[in-house]
């Protein structure tokens, strides 16, 4: 499974910029990879991991903005089409059997 976090946070004031930076750092430190600007994703090992990471997200939400979470299967994620641009280094094609989950 993959958990994708999509967010739109205000960055007008110094406090809002700090909240954005703290949330983004939380995502990176928690194992999320940037898919696009304001879209981060991570691999999950089942619904128990989904609950755990959802609780961690809720505990680290910024006070303002819009944050959405979408969980998809590996097959659904692999069916995503890249229409413009090149895949990132992290998106190099890897078979599901080559992924090691700990």
Image: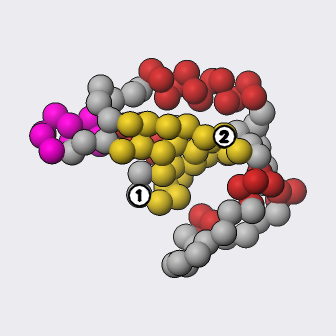
Residue 74 position, x and y percent, is 77, 51
How packed is label 2: few (under 14 Cα within 10 Å), some, or many (20 or more)?
A: some
Q: Is residue 46 above or below residue 32?
A: above
Residue 21 sits inside the magenta stretch: yes
Question: Which quadrant holds the N terminus?
Answer: top right
Q: Is residue 75 above or below residue 62?
A: below
Q: Are marks 2 and 1 in contact (CB under 8 Å)?
A: no
Residue 34 sits inside the magenta stretch: no
Q: Residue furthest bottom?
A: 85
Q: How is the image coloured?
A: secondary structure
On the picture, is 41 further left or further right than 44?
Answer: left
Return the residue at label 1. 37
Identify which residue is drawn at 80% across, 54% down: 75
| Magenta stretch, residue numbers | 12-22
Return the residue at label 2. 71
Residue 88 visible in the shown view: yes
Say which of 17 and 7 sits in front.
7
Residue 56 position, x and y percent, is 52, 25
How packed is label 1: few (under 14 Cα within 10 Å), some, or many (20 or more)?
A: few
């Amino acid at each position: 499974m993959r958990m994708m976090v999509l967010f739109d946070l205000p960055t007008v004031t110094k406090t809002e910029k700090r909240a954005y930076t703290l949330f983004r750092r939380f995502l990176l430190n928690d194992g999320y990879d940037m898919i696009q600007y304001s879209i981060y994703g991570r691999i999950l090992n089942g619904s128990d991991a989904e609950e755990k990471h959802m609780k961690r997200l809720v505990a680290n939400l910024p006070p303002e903005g819009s944050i959405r979470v979408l969980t998809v299967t590996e097959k659904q994620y692999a069916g995503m089409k890249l229409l413009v641009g090149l895949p990132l280094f992290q998106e190099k094609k890897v078979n599901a059997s080559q992924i090691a989950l700990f």
